[in-house]
Amino acid sequence: MAYCKFSDNLKYLRKQRGLTQKELGLKLNLSKAVISKYENGLGFPTLDLLMQFSEYFNVTTDYLLGVDHNKSIDVTDLTDEQINSLQNVVAEYRKLKEN
């Protein structure tokens, strides 16, 4: 089951970034064939590689595996004021979704 969710999530994240399988492979020193294998559920990355995917896409390994459906945003380099602004924007979107 995790294979399917991982493959779907990897493909979704890659496409969201507008990357081809080859381009993603180049960024992570992998071949297009390896990316294709993962996206088609024909293989599963090592823990180290799973962590690389997680870091590259700024998501948790739990998200990649389908355990956690929440995405996170890396705010490490932002000021407190910028983080506060982002939180306000998210709150506004949630209000719109409720209506």
Image (cartoon, helix red, strand yellow):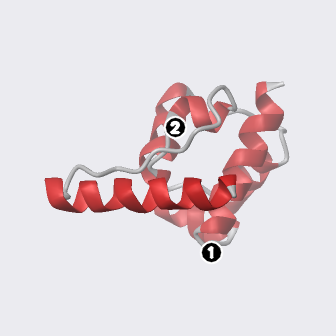
Mark sitting earlier along the chain (2/1): 1
Q: For the point 65% across and 36% down, which residue is it? A: 69
- From the top left corner, tell me how far across and down residue 82 is, in percent: 22, 62
Q: Tell me the SS state at disc 2.
A: helix
Res 49 label: 2
Q: Nearer the viewer, residue 83 or 39?
A: 83
Res 69 label: none
Q: Amino acid at mark 2?
A: Leu
Residue placed furthest toward the front: 99
Residues at discs 2 and 1 in contact (Cβ within 8 Å): no
Q: For the point 67% across and 72% down, which residue is it? A: 20
Q: Tell me the SS state at disc 1.
A: loop
Q: How many marks?
A: 2
Mark 2–mark 1 distance (CA, rounded to whole Å): 21 Å
For the N terminus, which image quadrant? top right
- From the top left corner, tell me how far across and down residue 47 is, in percent: 52, 26
